[in-house]
Image (cartoon, rainbow, N blue to C red):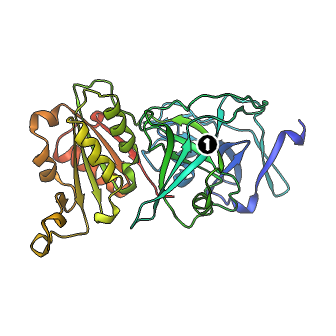
Amino acid sequence: MSRDDFVKVADTDEILPSQMKEVEVDGQSILIANVNGKYYAIGSICTHEGGPLADGTIHNYEVECPWHGSKFDIRTGEVTSLPATEPEPSYEIKVESNQILVKKQGSRKTPEIELTLLEKIKSEGTDVMSFKFSKKQGEQKKWGEDSQNIKEILDYKAGQFAFFDIGEVYNDSKGPIRHFTISSSPTEDFIMLSTRIRDSPYKQRLASLEKGAKVKVRGPQGEFVIHEDYSKTAIFVSGGIGVTPFRSMIKYATDMQLPLKIIMFDSNKNKESVLFKKEFDEWTSQNKNISIIYNLTEEKNPQEQQSSPMDIWKGEYGRIDKAMILRYVDSSTLKDSLFYICGPPNMLKAMKSLIQEELKIPEEKIKVEEFTGY
């Protein structure tokens, strides 16, 4: 087999025994792992809900996803522990001298869509930025094939995510591509992602994009979407930037006039960090089926010090607990609801424990989506 069939992805001293690294080959995110001095390669995005396997742990030949605990055999990509059910693709790998090489996969059917940046929006008082892209495709490519000129829209469900390749990202330990929840609704005339801007090369490059910049998008993926039995209430629990899929879902439910009752508990540190509040308040005024309870975790009730009734915070204070939820959800509704939790790992763990152990909601009625904040 020709060496031209392989591409160098790393040097051996970059991935020591029991370590992993995410790389990109022909637009595919691949996890390279060193087990007892031998190298293996499988897909790096968890097939369950898109978790970053490179941020997980490896023990013997098992890689565990940091989001929901799915495990995969690094040698074959097969699932060894639920909740994932689909295997990861595995890649042929070889080592020459101190170079780790991965075999190119050639033609693949995953489409790559080119979108144009329309607008950047800074959320004042936070480190969050939103990026609106054209909904029309400039080009659709298939790996290993010539471009085709196609004018269509990106077809996705409210709550799904996609992979964004913004180009010119160098020396980022997480690789040059990120996946983000699509925070816009399929009913809107743009594609939007919203994220915290960190110091990573990827995030800094993203923040520097100018209007008219072209980005490549693959997807969508993910099962964190609204259930189809509208007789069951949807209870959303969000923490910080974890509100992004709920923006998509609430806008979609409002535009489509879904007969679905939605109750959202939106937790943030302070008033300044509450995201999309103006839009949410507008949509709740249009949609009688939606209720949103905002709560602040790092501010105390200062009502006695308010100089004007207009300044009074009408939401809750403190962390979400059983008593807070029961103030807004009666017992009959609670028993016939599905819970959706999205936020950082610690918040997600605490909320899932609260809902299962204190509210006695079975695990099959709880959906989770974790934001690691990279």
Left-right relation of 216 to 219: right
185 shown above or below 97? above
Image height check: is 259 above or below 10? Answer: above
Q: Nearer the viewer, residue 274 or 50?
A: 274
Residue drawn at (28%, 24%) of the image: 229
Based on the displayed image, in which of its 4 quarters is residue 150 positioned? top right
**Residue 232 sits above or below residue 102 on the image:** above
In this view of the protein, which residue sits in the foreground, 35 or 106?
Answer: 106
Residue in the image at 53% along x and 35% along y: 220
Residue 126's image quarter? bottom left
Residue 122 in view of the camera: yes
Rendered-image quadrant of the N terminus: top right
Q: Position of residue 230 (x, y in %)?
A: 26, 25
Counting other residues with Cα less than 10 Å from the Cα at mark 1, is it few (<14), some (14-19), or many (20 or more)? many
As rendered, which of 120 and 239 lies closer to the eye?
A: 120
Q: Residue at x 16, y 37 (%)?
A: 334
Q: Which residue is mark 1?
A: 74
Q: Residue 295 appears at what percent x and percent y?
A: 22, 58
Question: x%, y% of residue 21?
Answer: 64, 54
